[in-house]
């Protein structure tokens, strides 16, 4: 089926992206904070297969860039020496998943050449590496916030739907209030009202907490609907007749019906929350320098000259679009499966 | 079972009353929430002044108490409510004026942008959605599906930035702000075209951002209706396709679209924040951002409340339109009272 | 059925007895001064004799299901007494009733709705055993398969979803689940409606077998007098929340006193099925 193929393709791309970002230290040729003051705002390094003498190389290579003496931020390639791209090179040290130190990088070139696949910023920092490391922050924020929203939503939705009565009434009124608030405005306001100058890890946790907490209402409503209908089934009545506790009924008869919806919601929320983090960081309310996040990487584009002249600074947008596309396709597929009743 | 004759004529009056009371309660709830989290904020507007060694801490304390910032929270809330009732809606420290006049100007700018964008988006989305629903599975439907998927995945932020980039590189349109510097010196036609030129980028960004969802909803709703027997019957009578789609199918598919319309109205004040900030459009968005950073709390609360008001109004509008448009909803409410 | 057997049995103390049971449902509609009151049960006096199959018959709305719910301790009556095993339980709290629940089990009308589609057949039977901590691990599955065999289901179907079973098979499964806790009383609420005649006959056969092997007391609720007339020892007829008539089945069927009973009898189709012949062969 066509949608099956789309789902598999999307899942593979997503997985590859997540893996690359998880192993940012390995995939990225440079450290995100490493500055190359000689090469600010250099455009992406070109990979060549044909050298100046017209010979074909199997292995791609790069030329070293040299700054033009007369103008700022303009470079030419020094065509005298080819620097082939090597794989599994030894480079700067990093830690795999917070623990094991390692030196190996996926690819690199010998000194003094550099390989800036996505160009550099005004400090000469490799954007490709920064995008990968920044992805760790942005994706993690999205995933964690989604987890929080879903957890809150499931808890409140379950209690609301299962016990009904005034608990249900008040919870759903509260949910309506949360749904009616313009979320972006509220997000900005809440974030801005909390301390602005705190450490990066605190900022990260704060962001995640705020984004996740605001979004509980929609999952809660969905879960509540499912719980309401499941709890009126005869097999729940039968279970009670066997002396089953509320916890047992929730766990074995009611909650399993929510899994499909929760999966779809998760696939929809993750890109939304990633974009929320990116937006906040873009406006300076999220992670700030020097920690890279897709948001503060894109924030460079707020400067007129950057926006106009240095198109490679748009690269984080590409990553963002890929993530969104992947998750939305997966969400669509889940939704269709849910409709047809296979989940 | 007795019904008074008046309510027999318009059985939804009671329902509307209920909704309006509901809406007022929501507003109160939103105001309390806004006030609550603004009170959690450490620091205040005058903190910036603390950095200035020329201003003594006594002056700062005097300023704070002048603006009532040292009062306990419930007192401040009551004073704010009184201010709202007086028509001032609080006071902006940064702009040194009542929040209301500030809000009005910015809200007008935002509404200009968003209503234009919304009208355009709906004007495009409905015909396109209706058309592709009848061409299900064929190349134009697939093209539409693919493009909506792609557009959906591009976040508004990126859309706005991208458009800005295009416009700057091609030097076609003025960038930034609502009007040019020489606006006042232009003739009336010149003023209109200047405004229009500045509108193009933000409006396009907003339209592109909302189009995919609208098209999808229209298409989905129409597809469901097109499978109904009465459409098959109409087709059998030889009714032309265009007429069939727009005069027979679309009205039946209208219910979910009306709700969606209400939601669109709901987002009129708050949906354009990103675009406004990036394109420099002087609307509520940049105002909110500024106020957040400078801790101009009554501005923040005012903006949040204004957009909440719109959201409530939008959903109320959707409900009313639904009641008016769909006779079934009316009789449902009548039986409610039985 | 032998009148002597029924008579001797009738001398034993009743398994369950209700006196003066009443229940009223009040429905309030929003924004209206009107209230609907439905008297589901009005001063009901009723007895269930142990080891016998009692039938409760009536039109829809006569209160049969409400009475069943009260007997199964799923609802509380407004007034009246319920005696079970010599104790008056109508006002007992949820916690006090808990140890009694395994003793009264119910089989519902809608077999598809009464079985969780996510469970396999064996898991459905295992559920009560698990909740009541009767068995564990391997024994759990073994006991479930035993019960499947007892109700006439093949143990190979242990992993099948109830959706893959026919209506009759599902009801057998529901019965297996209900008897897993060896209840004293089994209530079947319209469990035979919606099944075709031969399946109904098979299920009735099963009930009789269970009654014979386990001395299972059954309360069979139905609107179909012809059906229950074949198997029930005692019959009670309900009409508008009251017990119109109550006695041994042969008595009720041959000389009905109440006009409602006569009305129900008039629409009876006499059942001439393999059921009768099968029955004639096996019972004392």
Image (spheres, coloured by chain):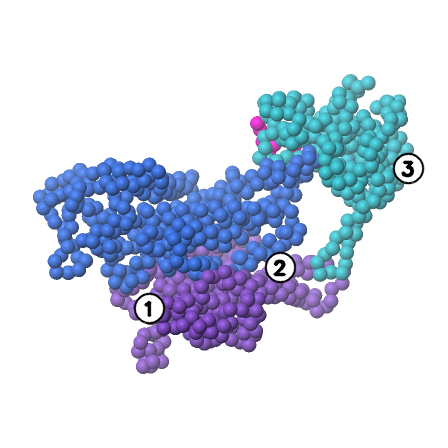
Chain colours: A blue, B purple, C cyan
Report which residue position mark 3 lands on. Answer: C257
Residue C173 is inside the magenta segment: no
Distance in Å between CA atoms under marks 3 and 2: 50 Å
Residue C17 visible in this rendered orientation of the protein: yes
Report which residue position mark 1 lands on. Answer: B176
Residue visible at 45% across and 59% down in the picture = A194
Q: Are marks 3 and 2 on the same chain?
A: no
Quadrant occupied by the C terminus of chain C: top right
Q: In this rendering, would C121 be left or right of B130?
A: right
Q: Are marks 3 and 1 on the same chain?
A: no
The answer to which image quadrant residue A280 occupies is: bottom left
Upstream in the sequence, badge 2 or badge 1? 1
Report which residue position mark 2 lands on. Answer: B329
Residue A101, above or below B42: above
- Tell me whether circle 3 and circle 1 mark residues in contact (CB < 8 Å): no
Q: Chain of mark 2?
A: B
Q: In this rendering, would C104 be left or right of B94?
A: right
Distance in Å between CA atoms under marks 3 and 1: 94 Å
Residue visible at 86% across and 39% down in the picture = C19
Q: Which residues are magenta?
A: C159-167
- Tell me whether circle 3 and circle 2 mark residues in contact (CB < 8 Å): no
Q: In this rendering, would A327 be left or right of C34?
A: left
Q: Chain of mark 3?
A: C
Residue visible at 74% across and 26% down in the picture = C207
The answer to which image quadrant residue C81 occupies is: top right
* Coordinates of residue C136 in the picture (x, y in percent): 61, 25
Q: Residues within 10 Å of mark 2 (few under 14, many from 20)?
A: some
Is C89 in front, or is C192?
C89
Residue C254 visible in this rendered orientation of the protein: no
Q: Chain of mark 1?
A: B
* Coordinates of residue B125 in the picture (x, y in percent): 44, 59
* Coordinates of residue A5 in the picture (x, y in percent): 39, 40
């Amino acid at each position: 089926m066509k949608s099956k193929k789309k789902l598999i393709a999307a899942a593979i791309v997503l997985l590859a992206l997540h893996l690359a970002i998880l192993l940012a230290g390995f995939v990225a040729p440079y450290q995100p904070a490493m500055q190359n003051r000689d090469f600010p705002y250099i455009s992406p390094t070109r990979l060549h297969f044909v050298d100046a003498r017209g010979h074909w190389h199997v292995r791609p290579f790069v030329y070293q860039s040299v700054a033009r003496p007369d103008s700022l931020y303009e470079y030419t390639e020094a065509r005298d020496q080819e620097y082939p791209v090597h794989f599994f090179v030894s480079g700067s040290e990093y830690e795999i998943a917070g623990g094991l130190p390692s030196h190996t990088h996926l690819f690199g070139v010998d000194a003094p050449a550099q390989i800036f696949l996505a160009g550099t910023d005004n400090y000469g920092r490799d954007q490709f590496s920064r995008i990968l490391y920044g992805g760790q922050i942005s994706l993690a924020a999205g995933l964690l916030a989604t987890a929080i929203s879903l957890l809150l939503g499931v808890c409140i939705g379950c209690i609301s739907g299962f016990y009904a009565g005034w608990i249900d009434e008040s919870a759903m009124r509260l949910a309506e209030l949360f749904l009616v608030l313009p979320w972006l405005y509220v997000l900005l306001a809440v974030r801005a009202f909390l301390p602005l100058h705190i450490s990066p890890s605190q900022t990260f946790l704060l962001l995640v907490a705020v984004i996740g907490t605001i979004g509980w209402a929609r999952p809660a409503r969905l879960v509540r609907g499912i719980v309401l209908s499941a709890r009126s089934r005869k097999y729940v009545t039968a279970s009670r007749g066997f002396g089953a506790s509320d916890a047992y009924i929730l766990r074995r008869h009611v909650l399993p019906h929510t899994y499909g919806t929760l999966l779809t919601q998760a696939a929809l929320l993750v890109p939304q929350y990633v974009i929320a983090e990116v937006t906040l960081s873009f406006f300076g309310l999220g992670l700030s320098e020097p920690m890279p996040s897709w948001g503060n990487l894109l924030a460079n584009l707020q400067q007129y000259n950057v926006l106009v002249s240095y198109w490679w600074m748009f690269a984080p947008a590409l990553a963002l679009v890929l993530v969104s596309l992947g998750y939305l396709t997966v969400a669509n597929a889940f939704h269709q499966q849910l409709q047809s009743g296979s989940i | 079972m007795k019904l008074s004759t008046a309510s027999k004529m318009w059985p939804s009056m009671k329902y509307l009353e209920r909704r309006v009371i509901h809406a007022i309660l929501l507003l109160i709830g939103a105001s309390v929430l806004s006030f609550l989290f603004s009170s959690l904020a450490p620091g205040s507007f005058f903190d910036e002044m603390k950095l200035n060694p020329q201003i003594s801490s006594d002056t700062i304390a005097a300023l704070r108490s002048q603006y009532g910032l040292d009062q306990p929270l419930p007192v401040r809330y009551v004073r704010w409510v009184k201010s709202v009732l007086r028509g001032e809606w609080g006071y902006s420290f940064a702009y040194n004026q009542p929040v209301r006049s500030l809000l009005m100007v910015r809200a007008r700018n935002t509404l200009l942008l968003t209503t234009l964008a919304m009208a355009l988006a709906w004007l495009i989305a409905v015909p396109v959605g209706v058309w592709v629903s009848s061409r299900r599975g064929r190349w134009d439907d697939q093209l539409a599906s693919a493009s909506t998927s792609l557009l959906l995945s591009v976040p508004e932020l990126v859309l706005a930035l991208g458009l800005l980039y295009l416009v700057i590189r091609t030097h076609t349109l003025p960038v930034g702000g609502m009007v040019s510097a020489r606006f006042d010196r232009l003739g009336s036609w010149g003023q209109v075209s200047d405004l229009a030129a500045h509108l193009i980028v933000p409006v396009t960004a907003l339209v592109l951002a909302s189009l995919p969802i609208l098209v999808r909803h229209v298409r989905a709703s129409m597809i469901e209706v097109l499978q109904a027997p009465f459409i098959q019957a109409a087709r059998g009578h030889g009714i032309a396709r265009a007429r069939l789609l727009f005069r027979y199918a679309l009205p039946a598919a209208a219910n979910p679209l009306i709700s969606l319309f209400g939601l669109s109205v709901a987002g009129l004040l708050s949906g354009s924040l990103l675009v406004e900030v990036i394109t420099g459009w002087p609307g509520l968005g940049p105002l909110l951002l500024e106020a957040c950073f400078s801790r101009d709390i009554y501005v923040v609360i005012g903006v949040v409340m204004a957009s909440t008001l719109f959201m409530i109004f939008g959903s109320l509008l959707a409900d009313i339109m639904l009641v008016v448009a769909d006779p079934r909803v009316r009789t449902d409410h009548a039986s409610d009272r039985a | 059925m032998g009148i002597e057997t029924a008579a001797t049995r009738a001398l034993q103390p009743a398994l369950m007895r209700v006196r003066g049971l009443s229940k009223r449902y009040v429905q309030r509609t929003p924004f209206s001064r009107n209230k609907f009151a439905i008297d589901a049960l009005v001063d009901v006096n009723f007895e269930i004799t142990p080891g016998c199959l009692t039938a409760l018959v009536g039109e829809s709305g006569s209160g049969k299901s409400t009475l069943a719910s009260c007997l199964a301790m799923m609802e509380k009556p407004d007034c009246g007494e319920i005696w079970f095993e010599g104790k008056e339980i109508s006002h007992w709290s949820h916690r006090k009733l808990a140890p009694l629940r395994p003793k009264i089990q119910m089989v519902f009308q809608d077999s598809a709705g009464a079985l969780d589609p996510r469970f396999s057949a064996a898991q459905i039977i295992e559920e009560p055993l698990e909740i009541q901590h009767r068995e564990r691990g391997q024994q759990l599955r073994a006991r479930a398969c035993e019960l499947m065999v007892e109700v006439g289901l093949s143990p190979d179907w242990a992993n099948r979803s109830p959706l893959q079973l026919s209506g009759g098979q599902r009801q057998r499964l529901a019965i297996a689940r209900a008897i897993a806790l060896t209840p004293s009383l089994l209530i079947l609420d319209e469990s035979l409606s919606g099944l075709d005649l031969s399946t109904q006959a098979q299920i009735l056969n099963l009930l009789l077998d269970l009654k014979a092997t386990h001395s299972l007391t059954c309360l069979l609720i139905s609107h179909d007098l012809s059906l229950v007339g074949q198997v029930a020892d005692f019959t009670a007829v309900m009409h508008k929340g009251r017990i119109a008539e109550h006695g041994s089945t042969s008595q009720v069927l041959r000389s009905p006193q109440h006009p409602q009973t006569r009305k129900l009898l008039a629409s009876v189709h006499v059942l001439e099925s393999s059921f009768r012949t099968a029955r004639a062969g096996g019972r004392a």
